[in-house]
Image (tube, rainbow, N blue to C red):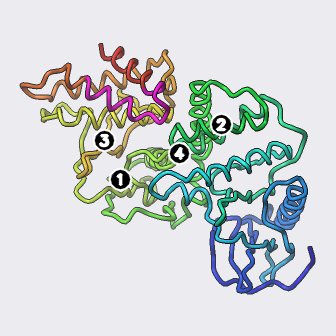
Amino acid sequence: MSLVPPHPPEAVLKAGPKRTVLRTASGTIVKRFHAPGALDRWKDPLRAWREARMLSRLARRGVRVPRAIAWRRGADGHWELELEEVPAAVDLAALLERPGRPRIAQLRGLLVLAVNMARAGHRHADLHPGNVLLDGEHRAWLIDVGRGRLGGAPSSRELADLLAKVGGRLREQLDARAREWLAGRLMRELRVPPPHPAELETEARRSRAREASRRDDRWTRASGSCVPRGPGFAHRQPAPGPWHRSAALEPAQARAWWVELGRLEEHRLPAARPVLLREGAGTARVVHGLPAGAVPIQLSSDEEAERAALAAPLGSLLGQLHDRGLEWDPAHPVTLARAPSGELLVVRARLRAASAGGGERDGVGRRACLRAAWRWIVQGAGDGQAPADLRRAFCAAYSEGHLGGPLDRLRALAHCEEDLA
């Protein structure tokens, strides 16, 4: 690497509160470090140097990473790291957003990268789909490695933790069959006995729930999710609308609601989209987005209504929540919305960590949520509706809301039927 004059930026690829990634006119990539606080900014040259050094060390150990060209202070005073551009690259997060399943060649590229990382003894500090690029030949490249570390070959415990973390990050975007294939092939390549699929699914679910909980603070500071705006925060990519503004709330209540909407979005759950948190003197309001034509529903209301048609949508929503390790407190009001598609969306509820995740048996809180929702359905089902038929529809949809494989869903179905018996 050499110290060379910086290239003029041509396009911003990614912008965040601490780093901006740009493509230069000459076809290279520049990562610009600009920590917001004065105390944090002095670490920027260390961050640039550390990432350049780690990229060189990983390349020598056989891990596919972009080549570091130079690290330097830019014309605007910010430190920069210049990298070669990965040809025709798409990050794994964007790839998984596309309709249809990823190709087997793309999954093999991801597998090769994971195997090489393990053999190199690399522990990535922030491994997620956005930090993996796939090129036009389906080869996977690792990026954003500055906070990682190198060591010896990982232990069986570390490999199990890696599987849980990777499985947790992918479980809301990649189906159970593909995740089991990746885990099995990875362990065989590393000559380690693979865990049982049920155990792997449980650990991935727990890992994802812990990670999402730690990311709650992203909604009350400058982050990749939101930005400060006036006396409050705004979503970086707000829903297109229509938008709905809440009544005036106590600031603590509004913040709690705002963070809950962020958690639901983090888990890709059907819910209102957070748009804006506006905080004032003693009061605050939350603005959220819903599909056009969505109809609000008060789950805790005693109003008589035809609810038989909501049995399956409500079962599916609860199944998805419980699968992510979440549940709502049935002792507090629950506001949902029914989209024109028939899907139910969470608008406002008192969320909490589920007393038992997914298919685990001792789910006292899960049982209370299911029974409260079921009572609401039965009370407004109307004449001529057989409770047994409604219960079958409710429980079948509940099990389908789980992201695990067939055994995981069968277990969820059995628990739902037993809880409602």
Residue lying furthest left:
383
How packed mark 1 is, by other alpha carbons closer than 10 Å (few <14, some 14-19, many 20 or more), is: some
Pick the quarter of the image with the N terminus.
Answer: bottom right
Q: Is 404 drawn above or below residue 113 in the view shown?
A: above
Report helix, strand or loop for mark 4. Answer: loop
Q: Earlier in the sequence, mark 4 or mark 1?
A: 4
Q: Is residue 379 left or right of residue 101?
A: left
**What's the residue type where badge 1 is placed?**
Ala
Residue identifier under label 3: 335
Q: Quadrant of residue 141?
A: bottom right
Closer to viewer: mark 1 or mark 3: 3
Tell me the CA gap for discs 1 and 3: 17 Å
Asked if the residue under mark 4 is in contact with the one under mark 2, i.e. CB atoms within 8 Å, the reply is no
Tell me which amino acid carries mark 3.
Thr
The residue carrying mark 2 is: 183
Asked whether, in this view, residue 32 is left or right of residue 203, the answer is right
**Discs 3/2, front:** 2
Horizontal side, residue 342 vs residue 416: left or right: left
Q: Is residue 355 magenta?
A: no
Residue type of the residue flagged with mark 2: Ala
Mark 4 or mark 1, whichever is nearer to me: 4
Q: Secondary structure at mark 1?
A: loop
Residue 20 vs residue 56, the one in the foreground = 56
Q: CA distance from mark 1 to mark 2?
A: 49 Å
Q: Which three-letter amino acid code belongs to the residue tagged 4?
A: Leu
Disc 1: which residue: 248
On the image, the x and y values in percent for residue 362 come to: 49, 15
Identity of the residue drawn at 73% across and 86% down:
8
Q: Nearer the viewer, mark 1 or mark 2?
A: 2
Q: CA distance from mark 2 to mark 4?
A: 12 Å
